[in-house]
Amino acid sequence: MRIDILVSGGTFDKEYQELSGKLFFRETHVPEMLRLGRCRLDLRVRTLMMVDSLLMTMRQRRRILDACRRSPSDRIVITHGTDTMVETAKVLGRGIQDKTVVLTGAMVPYKFGSSDGMFNLGSALSFAQSLPPGVYIAMNGRCFPWSDVRKNKAKGEFEPLR
Amino acid sequence: MRIDILVSGGTFDKEYQELSGKLFFRETHVPEMLRLGRCRLDLRVRTLMMVDSLLMTMRQRRRILDACRRSPSDRIVITHGTDTMVETAKVLGRGIQDKTVVLTGAMVPYKFGSSDGMFNLGSALSFAQSLPPGVYIAMNGRCFPWSDVRKNKAKGEFEPLR
Amino acid sequence: MRIDILVSGGTFDKEYQELSGKLFFRETHVPEMLRLGRCRLDLRVRTLMMVDSLLMTMRQRRRILDACRRSPSDRIVITHGTDTMVETAKVLGRGIQDKTVVLTGAMVPYKFGSSDGMFNLGSALSFAQSLPPGVYIAMNGRCFPWSDVRKNKAKGEFEPLR
Amino acid sequence: MRIDILVSGGTFDKEYQELSGKLFFRETHVPEMLRLGRCRLDLRVRTLMMVDSLLMTMRQRRRILDACRRSPSDRIVITHGTDTMVETAKVLGRGIQDKTVVLTGAMVPYKFGSSDGMFNLGSALSFAQSLPPGVYIAMNGRCFPWSDVRKNKAKGEFEPLR
């Protein structure tokens, strides 16, 4: 059972640019995180884009949908910024029936020492293996179906709609 | 759905004692790890013992079995040293039918910067929510039923028997 | 021999605000860094301001000068953003004759895992103990008198004028 | 002014061997630490030995003395285990007159996240540049002449004899 990891950017992969003092994207840290987690799953990691999810366009969300459909695997994990993760999940949820797709991300960049990234990546890969087909968001140790989740921006947490 | 986390020690929780230069146990780091992972599950963390699993006795394994049975929750995660995790899983597997119990641990202590602990904890909590009743080991991003797993000591990884 | 540490902010003390994804100041990390360094010097840490040095005003630089003059100690370390550290050093260099004052900072925030902050703090405190009266910048393991230093912004390093 | 860094092992360089759960030496982390500290000094790093200082022999201490004498540089930093740092300092103090030699180490391995190593390395390199010829121990932000220092083993700190 191979799992595809599709990288779209987000806080997960942000780094500190020491000359400018700004946050920026270089390359994804997902392979390094998998090494650190001693992960021994059969995985393929593919970077689709490296964007702040606040700036993600509908065209880019469709590109993610397209990548999920074309993937030879029917278990997919997508790393994504948390701000519009729910929107992308909706696009995928309406367009995919026969695969288990799990979106995850982080509130703090992996490189910043106190990140939730490792925890969330372990969680997302596990839900991707054990849940039936559907599109889900795995954050805060929980897993939400795409149609019943929102980001509580005041708390920085995900929660069910009701 | 509340999940019980039972702490038994293991590499997970080892620390560096700077006066002696030895590794030792103080208190469990599980609550700190859950905070770092921004975990929002309904959890109870309980320390049963703090032992190196090479030194764990059959009596202690039975104490873990007993704690699983008495737990009001039917979803349980156990942190455990990797060296004899398979033995404890067997004791639990033969003694528990109606609960989902997931053992996990780490190859490197949480406090040592490059630990697999956060990844494994996220993984174990996710499998505990999504798998049917049974006793499992969650390590290396994978999940093994208690009756089909061994630790490959040369590689430091878990694998199926065949 | 007591050393005064005056905190003015800078990259040193920046943190990641997880709700907004922006960098911000909360409290200084200097006491935590001294604990981590097992520092046993007789020190007093005082926060004068928490500012990005690009935004530091002449009025604030004069406040730092004033704090140095009023300090009961004649050995002083100042944490400061690197962008205008040289300007503040000039104000202090022209206004202080009888004290050893060492400015230091970091290219990467202390909280971000791969910071140069601990190295620079150890360096600054050592130069403050061993150098004769004067105003200095301690960065990159080196120490420069205030009148012969500039920040090479392309490299993110400090260097002598010639 | 070139500084020689002579590596002799010690807690500084210990790592966690994940298969055995023991601490061990691989290679020195000093070059990585200098990179992290953005150190721009003219340095040469040379590994003389990789030993736990409790096991260091008189023959090995004489080898360190010999390396100091033969070094083309007259500013030398030595990384050393803390347990017998004072003994080696005595051998060097009696045998070297015309060079500034600073011994330093760490109470917690560099690789273990909460190490004092970066702080001590920054400190030792600074004292090596600014102090007159002599043999010193730089620990806890302080600097002690070889003839007036002991390790307080109960506290894990260095202090003057009286």
Image: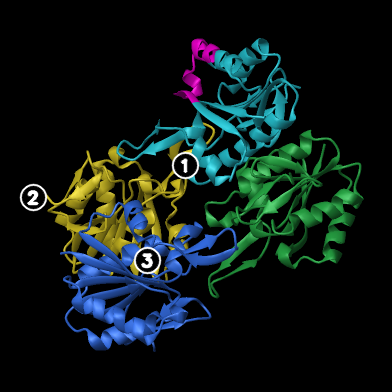
Chain colours: A yellow, B blue, C cyan, D green
- Asked if badge 1 and badge 3 are on a common chain, one would say no
The residue that disc 2 covers is A162
- The residue nearer to you, when weighing B102 against A79, is B102
**Residue under label 1:** C111
Amino acid found under the numbered disc labelled 2 = Arg
- For the point 28% across and 83% down, the residue is B92
Q: Are marks 1 and 2 in contact (CB under 8 Å)?
A: no
Q: Secondary structure at mark 1?
A: helix
The quadrant holding residue A1 is bottom left
The alpha-carbon separation of the residues under discs 1 and 2 comes to 36 Å
Q: Secondary structure at mark 3?
A: helix
Q: Which numbered tag is attached to residue A58?
A: none
Q: What amino acid does circle 1 point to?
A: Lys
Identify the residue at horizontal 43%, vertical 78% (top origin): B53
Instruction: Determine if the magenta segment contains residue B147.
Output: no
Cα distance in 3D space between marks 1 and 3: 24 Å
Residue B160: image location, x then y, percent? 38, 84
Point out the stretch of residues depicted in magenta.
C47-63
Residue type beneath disc 3: Asn
Q: Chain of mark 3?
A: B
Q: On the image, which quarter does residue D148 sit in?
A: top right
Which residue is pictured at 74% across the width and 55% down the height? D85
Q: Extreme front residue here? A: D162
Residue A47 in view: yes
User: In the image, residue A135 lies at what x, y percent?
Assistant: 20, 59
In whole angstroms, how far apart are the C-alphas of marks 2 and 3? 30 Å
**Is disc 2 on the same chain as disc 1?**
no
C19 relative to C7 in the view: left or right: left
The correct choice, above or below, for C117 with respect to C44 in the image is below
Tag of residue B120: 3
* Residues packed near mark 2 inside 10 Å, few (<14), some (14 to 19) or many (20 plus): few
